[in-house]
Amino acid sequence: MYFKLALKNVKKSYRDFSVYFITLTFAVAFFYVFNSFEQQRVILQLNEVQGFMFESLSIIMDVISVIVALVFAYLIIYANNFLIRRRKKELATYTLLGMKKSTISKILIYESSVIAFVSLIVGVALGTGLSHIFVLLTAKILSVTVNYGFIFSITALIKTVGIFALLFGVVMIFNSRVLNKYKLIDLLQADRKNDETVVKQTKLSVFVFILGAVLLGIAYKWVLIPGEIVFSLFPIIALGIIGTVLVFKGLAGFMLKFIQSNKSVYYHGLNTFVFRQLSSKINVTYKTMATISILILFGVGTLVTGFNINNVLASQINQSIASDLNVVLKDDSRKFKYDPSSVKEEIITTTYIESNPEIVSQLETLSGGSEVVKVATLQYMSVSDFNKHLKEHGEKGIDLKEGEFSLSTIPYNMNRTTKFLPEMISDGSELKVSNAKLKYKKIGEVSSLITINNDLRNVYLIVNDSELKTLLNNQSIQVSSVMTRHSFELNKDVDSYAFKDKLVHDNNLDENSDLVLSAQEMLDQMSGVELTLAYISIYLGPVFLITCAVILALQQLSEATDNKKRYKVLSDLGVDSKLIKSSVLKQISVYFLIPLSIGLLHSYVGVKAVAGSFTAAYKESIISFAPTVTILVFVLGIYMVYFWITYKGSLAIILED
């Protein structure tokens, strides 16, 4: 009997449960998709490196799933709180009819079970379909072939069911505690109680608002300093959260007075009623609205930075590739064996590691105090060997006379400046090496030439061939080792992994002392990073954003129930339905717009801070127009969907007979 009553309640109150159900279905679908990630391996042709990265990403997804589960736990409990609040009179009726609280709790458990069961069925079905779409995304990022076929992850299903069973168990305990807390008189008079104003003094409210704005300004200025978003992330976030809460708290106290000062606006239509309702609601929910703004920051920031950083990383990895395969030997006395039929072109160069601190100190001074030289490995290279690399990259050779030197490195800034080392030294600057004096000669863009795959920390001091021999014969120069580089461009159909394995085996290379690194290996590793960033962005971003929209929607639907009698009075006084619809639209619009605006402002500053740090480090902006605009349209689309559902649901509640 109680189950039938619960089922009837769900059918009767489908408008109340619609937003809740849709959100739970989405949550189940996404939770299933990202926990079925490992199952994608069945239909993807992955090499060994990609397979390892796939396993690592699966572990990351499991960790993030815990965070997502906590977010949804908060959402479910929050939604239940509002649904119970709306149904207080119904629960009071059950009590007057003689039902025990344990029986009422049982009905609520049945209702939750019905919603949970249906959302699980629909969500898993939707998630199964989405998982096949995500396989295509994975294949595109990794550039692998897909063996098309149906996949279904039992492991993901068990995890999804287990997590949501646990969440609903918490909800049932929460419902029982809420019921035990309420007295009958509280339930009967639920719709007569007005919300208390948190801040009643206008001057104090303005002061609190200004204080919050100042704290936000400090947080904004702090985070925009290049690199501080990494080194001072947590104190910046804490300062931003405090500032956001104070801004909303202050706004709640003086908003009504501010609107009342503009009489033409305040007394227009039903604005008197609308703004009083808004002021009363914000007084109670200012903490929630502040939380929503912060979650919007995390959601938008995760999506924008995640996808834009991918573009930069792809560009950086391409700049870090010298050839199809590099071998760096620390002993050039051996005969090097390889299959010549596999190689299209070979280049051999030799460099000499310099460990004289005097040279490093001089370069640091000449570059205006740059610490790049201190943390890099300084090496000598002859101009003829350097020109071999230039030719390999399609560049013209350079000429250095005796007594001249130049520098080559990549445009990577470890001291977060906008220039890189070769640009920091003035043309003609003198470098003293023992008894010789060398003059610096700038060589333009080719100074950022990469000579070894993934060559991130080497700085090459390039000199004339005859000068190099003189410097190396001088006893004051400390040469710690000699390295010979074999740089290969492989034939089109050669497998770089197989070529590398044979090279290591035939030449008895020690990968601890020698270095063998293929371009394909670097690209596979970077595609794994891109895949990780993309999946984390897609997983966390929409979860945060939809959570915000759902909370706003549920609050406004609950508010519509509270305001139903008030709108009925207005209707009895002769206010037509068109004006009532307009006032509902205004109230919901303002309530959605305020946290969205502050959240987007936070997001703008946060994304700008990340972009600034990347630009300082890599001399390249991470923000691309197309993906950023697409993400913003997606964010606004989510809000428009929930806004429209909320508006229509509120009208149905207010205008129903």
Image (spheres, rainbow, N blue to C red):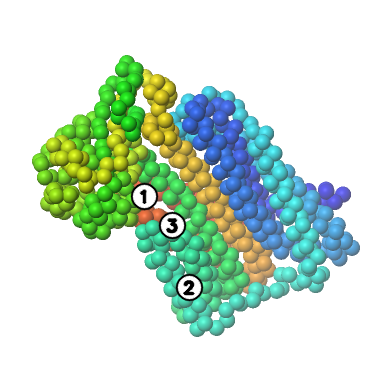
- Disc on the earlier residue, 1 or 2: 2
User: For the residue labelled by badge 3, is the local secondary structure a helix, a strand or a loop?
Assistant: helix
Residue 586 visible somewhere in the drawing? no
Residue 307 falls left or right of residue 566: left
Spot occupied by residue 110 in the image (x, y as percentages of width and height):
79, 50
What is the CA distance from the residue labelled 3 to the residue labelled 1? Answer: 18 Å
Residue topped by disc 2 = 212
User: For the residue labelled by badge 2, is the local secondary structure a helix, a strand or a loop?
Assistant: helix
Residue 2 falls left or right of residue 359: right
What amino acid is labelled 2 in the image? Answer: Gly
Spot occupied by residue 287 in the image (x, y as percentages of width and height):
58, 68
Which one is nearer the viewer's eye here, 348 or 657? 348
Residue 185 falls left or right of residue 136: right
- Disc on the earlier residue, 3 or 1: 3
Q: Residues within 10 Å of mark 1 (few under 14, many from 20)?
A: many
In the rendered image, which quarter contains the C terminus?
bottom right
What amino acid is labelled 3 in the image? Answer: Val
What is the CA distance from the residue labelled 1 to the residue labelled 2? Answer: 29 Å
Please tell me in which quadrant of the rendered image residue 279 appears.
bottom right
Asked whether disc 1 touches disc 2, contact meaning CB atoms under 8 Å apart, the reply is no
- At 63% from the left edge and 31% from the top edge, which residue is drawn? 152
Residue topped by disc 1 = 623
